[in-house]
Image (spheres, helix red, strand yellow):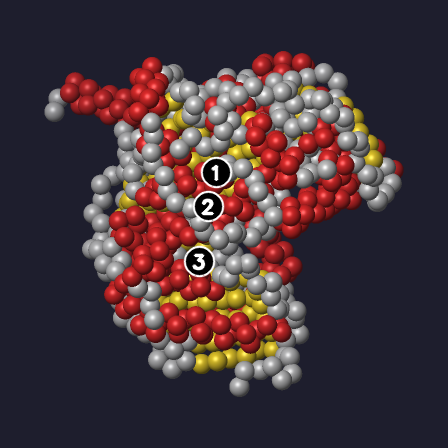
Amino acid sequence: MNVRNARKALLTVLILAPFSPLAGQSADYEAVHVDQRPRTPLVTIGIRLPIGSERDGSGLAGTAWLLGNTLAAQANTALEPRAGITVDVGRSSTLFTLSTLPEQWRSTWSTLERTLFDAELDPDAFQQERSTLSDELRFQRGSPTLDFEQESVQLLASPSSPWARPTRGTLESIESITAADLEGLRRSSYLAADAVAAMIGAGVAAAPLAHRRAGVSRSPDGPGWVVGTRLTLTQEVTSTWISFAYPVAGPVPRNALDFVAHLIQARLSTVPPDPNRFGLSVRVIDAPLGSVITVEAAVAPEAADRFEREIQRVVSSLTEQPPSADFFGWDRRRFRAELLLTDSAPERAVARITSDLLRDGQARHLAEEIWEITPQALAAALLALGEPRILRLGPDLEGNDIP
Amino acid sequence: MGWPRTRRTSSCLNRYDTEPLGSPHFPEAPSGAFCVSIGSALLALILLALLTAPVALHAQASDAVFLPDTVLRAAGVPRVLILRANPGGVAALRLSVPLLERPAEAGVGRMLAALSERRMEGPAREIGARVSAQRTPWGLTYSVEGAAADIEHLAYLLRLAVEEPAPELSTLERLRAELILDLDRRAESPGDRLLADLRRAAAPDLPSLAGSHVSLRRLETSLMRAVWRRSHRTSSMSLVAMTSVDPTVLLAMLQAPGLPAEDVAPPFDAADPGDPPAGPPPLRNWYGEARVDPSLGDPHAAVAALLMSQHVADAGPGVEVGVRLWELRDRTLLVVAGAALGRRATATLNAVVQAAVPDVLLALDPLMVREAVARVELVYRTRASTPGGLVEAVGRGVDGTGRASGASDYLAALARVTAASLTDYLNRLGAPVVVEIVP
């Protein structure tokens, strides 16, 4: 190529670069999923890194949390008011979600990438985040909700597993964390090549990247345990928290597991709502020991025995008599609507899609795949539930304990 | 898992004059069947309208998201605006019904909305759909959202929503008691009282959508039916739908909801039911100002409210101030109000509230305005980022302006806001209405 041609080529690149659909993307991800939604007035991009609190060093619980929040604060400072960043630091992954004006998605995505993978950590942002977290933890010290959360997560992992550490750390541990600890974790673990991304909006595009092999799960097949347990913790509080953790045996398709969780939640959600039940959550969790379905409820102490029996009864009856025929059809219809409605919020969709990508190497196409769930597949998923580990935390009401 | 965090950078609140009941509603048993018939004459009218009513496509590419693909006007059916959706996902429908209440009828709209929501909730649960009914400054809106494949059932839910009310006496009394309790709750809260007083002073000709003790006690089934018959005219309704279904098929599913058009007496012939009862004396001093923008949907109001909220954010210790953008039927209120304890803090409160607009005028610069415009746009688009949110944004644009392009026009006008135009806007607002509540 002579000098004139080289100049022409360079000029062409410079002119076309701003118009290239790939101009915003500077990093090569492990997988990228693009969901074109022409009727979405914003562009939403999720970047999920396989880095969570399980990677915190000993005595430094909260490092990943502080790192994620510091970087999100830095990115927000750089991007406001054109875009907003939220961050969700979990036990095994961290999700950054960018919501941006359509005309600016390339430049804002690029800024987010630079912040995550290249820019210097801002010591002021770190101090601010640590101070905020410290205030939160101090305010919440002694909270039975946090005690319950910390105890219930122990059901899902071996006693020494770092996965079960408090995600946000403790007052003591976050005081020990320095900016250098954050930088160390970031340099060793914040790698675009390990991350996955999902983009939702009109006119968004990404480089065609080689996706990981489909269907390869990073979670062990399970079951996490074969013998159920029951643990009661007594605290003089005004509510009782109940957790059931059901281990899942063998690889079970995610849609079927989500369907099981939906059914349990629906069967336990009476209409009108029971005034003695303050909260209910049924989730599928990818725990170190394998996939687990957890059922957690906050109830009035005097009604705790009844709710515990009710949870057991609902799961047993579903296992013994899975929905079939028209009942199955109606249940599947409701399940599909629930998932599609949840997924219609772009920030929820990128959270789900990036989880799919990280776990299975590909994103689910909900509308079609849910329709393909058969009564037999649902029955098999229900049969895969093992003996639960049960935790109860609340006041001791004399004579009301389950034997 | 850790909790996602978001940052709150100002205390600006956008509020519409919408006062849904906050209490839980219990569903009724599922009932009814689908009906998909439509007359050939109607079909011909609809097809003619489809051919002759193209939508203006003048907006920027990203604003086009808010423009309907199809606008359908035909005699005897609601005005229909279709936002074409990808098949297989989620469908959202929003039907709006204009409603003016006589002062003595104040609160009927909220009651109709509550009854409608109860009718829809049971059947909606059967298919996992989301439903809501709301009283807006312009009337009533009925919204349903669910799987696109369930579009027939979603249309059926809308038909249920607009049915003539026939509540049992116990249901009526329970709802009335909830509405009166809500009034009492507001009367007990000095903040709510201050806002209500400012609204009454700034818009004395508009009855409160919440109603009054007098109007609510008069609220009987016969009155509700009379208001329903007057308002629920098929030809005055507007339907915004995000769906992949053909508009004619959608209309067939709805089967001309409501009643045929006929002449209706103007609804302003009753006495004012009087002032609400006074609540208990407050502990703090409350002070508020409301400026009246005589128009609706001017984006300067949102930009001004955002900038004002940034100016009052650091009012000082012991002083609590907020800014509220409040859309009424035919005008917009910019409200700055707050509370303080003690003489010195109260003086600061009054000074901060009084200086909110002058301070913004003094500090205005092009960069600040550009950033505020971008922030307002981001919030507007975020609210419209789901199918339900999008039909709500487009529907509100239609209700407020009468134009199918109302939402898109709003964004286009927002992009034209400058420091100079904002200065002009704020200077045109005039003197504020002032209300003070002291211990």
Distance from label 2 to label 3 (Cα)?
A: 29 Å
Q: Residues within 10 Å of mark 1 (few under 14, many from 20)?
A: many
SS at mark 1?
Answer: strand
Distance from label 3 to label 1 (Cα)?
A: 35 Å
Compared across the picture, whether B92 is left or right of A148 comes to left
SS at mark 2?
Answer: strand
- Tell me the number on the disc at residue B7: none
Q: Camera-side residue: B407 or B207?
A: B207
- Look at the picture and state if B272 lies above or below A28: above
Look at discs 3 and 1 and give the one toward the viewer. 1
Disc 2 residue type? Answer: Arg
Q: What is the chain identity of the residue bearing mark 1?
A: B
- Callouts 1 and 2 close, C-beta under 8 Å: yes
Residue A266: x percent and y percent? 44, 60
Residue A207 image-quadrant placement: top left
- Look at the picture and state if A362 lies above or below B365: below
Residue B176 image-quadrant placement: top right
- Tell me the number on the disc at residue B130: 2
Disc 3 residue type? Answer: Gly
SS at mark 3?
Answer: loop
Mark 1 lies on residue: B143
Disc 1 residue type? Answer: Ser
Residue A74: x percent and y percent? 49, 42
The residue drawn where x is 44% and y is 26% is: B78
Compared across the picture, whether B213 is left or right of A128 comes to right
The residue drawn where x is 65% and y is 59% is: A139
Mark 3 lies on residue: A90
- Look at the picture and state if A364 lies above or below A389: above
Q: Do marks 1 and 2 share a subunit? A: yes
The residue drawn where x is 34% and y is 52% is: A333
Distance from label 1 to label 2 (Cα)?
A: 8 Å
